[in-house]
Amino acid sequence: MIKDNINLERLPQHIAIIMDGNGRWAKEKGKYRIFGHENGVKAVREVSEGCAELGVKFLTLYAFSTENWNRPKMEINALMTLLVKTIKKETDTLMKNDIKLEAIGDRTTLPKDCRKELEEAIEITKNNTKMTLILALSYSAKWDIVNATRDIVKRAIDGEIALDEVNENLINNTLTTHKYPHPELMIRTSGEHRISNFLLWEIAYSELYFTNVLWPDYRKEHLHEAILDYQKRERRFGKTSEQLV
Ligand code: FPP
């Protein structure tokens, strides 16, 4: 089994995933796009369980981007309904598995019921400690960076911070992702090689892993393959190989 080859001492602490290919998966089967999203829920369950089993501490899933608001209204409504239903249905599973749910993104743009279910699940699971599952919902990295910049400028105008206090740390701590370590591994499914406005700042030194598997077909074994591939890589952070020895 691929899983047995994973070195548990060298796991990524945080994995971020761009779940892509739901629409194409459905189209291949002659179905509506939402059928693909519905079947994507199984993959969400698989990776969440897979990460928790191994001991990965943080998993961020790109569930809905700021740009996704430009999709046809019917698809947006169906996706939001699916999200509400899934969050409600899976809260017990999150409790059983000691998983804490959190979210990044502009919650004010979410439909009321979606926001309510999300906030309820966040509240119910807040004391869980095994893993944190972070849903990126109505999220984009540029949205986060713009907001952080506004916040910093305001604090500077108000005299709370001086110009030379604006540094990497301050920006880091102002982003909505400040509570989490930066992902060591980012996975994108469906054969697309793009970042699509996801965690731009946070992936400065992430290992990127692309697979042709469409999201609804993604299973634990695929996650294990990605982690194994990550463990074979040498992370140099700008240094030479010799310096790392
Ligand atoms: C990308 O496929 C997928 C999405 C925009 C939505 C992902 C949502 C789910 C898997 C539903 C449930 C999620 C949670 C977290 C409960 P796409 O539509 O861009 O596919 P395409 O590129 O083939 O068109």
Image (cartoon, helix red, strand yellow):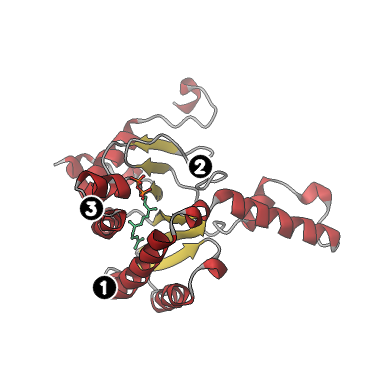
Among the two numbered marks 2 and 1 on one chain, the one whose residue lies closer to the N terminus: 1
Disc 3 from disc 1: Cα separation: 34 Å
Please name the residue that numbered disc 2 is placed on: 203
Query: Residue at image x 45%, y 47%?
Result: 183
Q: Nearer the viewer, residue 41 or 241?
A: 41
Residue 129 higher or lower than 199, as above or below:
below
Residue 194 percent location from the top left of the image: 45, 37
Q: CA distance from mark 2 to mark 1?
A: 31 Å
Q: Secondary structure at mark 2?
A: loop
Residue 181, percent from left and from top: 49, 52
Disc 3 or disc 2, which is closer to the eye? 3
Q: Residue at x 48, y 43 (%)?
A: 196
Q: Is residue 191 left or right of residue 106?
A: left
Residue 62, percent from left and from top: 42, 53
Please give the name of the residue rendered at 40% of the width and 42% of the height, measured from the top-left corner.
Answer: 185
Q: Which label number is shown at residue 96?
A: 1
Q: Which residue is denoted by mark 3 in the rendering? A: 31
- Three-letter code, disc 3: Lys
Going by the numbered disc 2, the residue's amino acid type is: Ile
Instruction: Find numbered disc 3 in the image and state the secondary structure of the residue it sits on.
Output: loop
Instruction: Report the number of numbered marks.
Output: 3
Q: How many C-alpha atoms fall within 10 Å of the one at disc 3: few (<14), some, or many (≥20)?
A: few
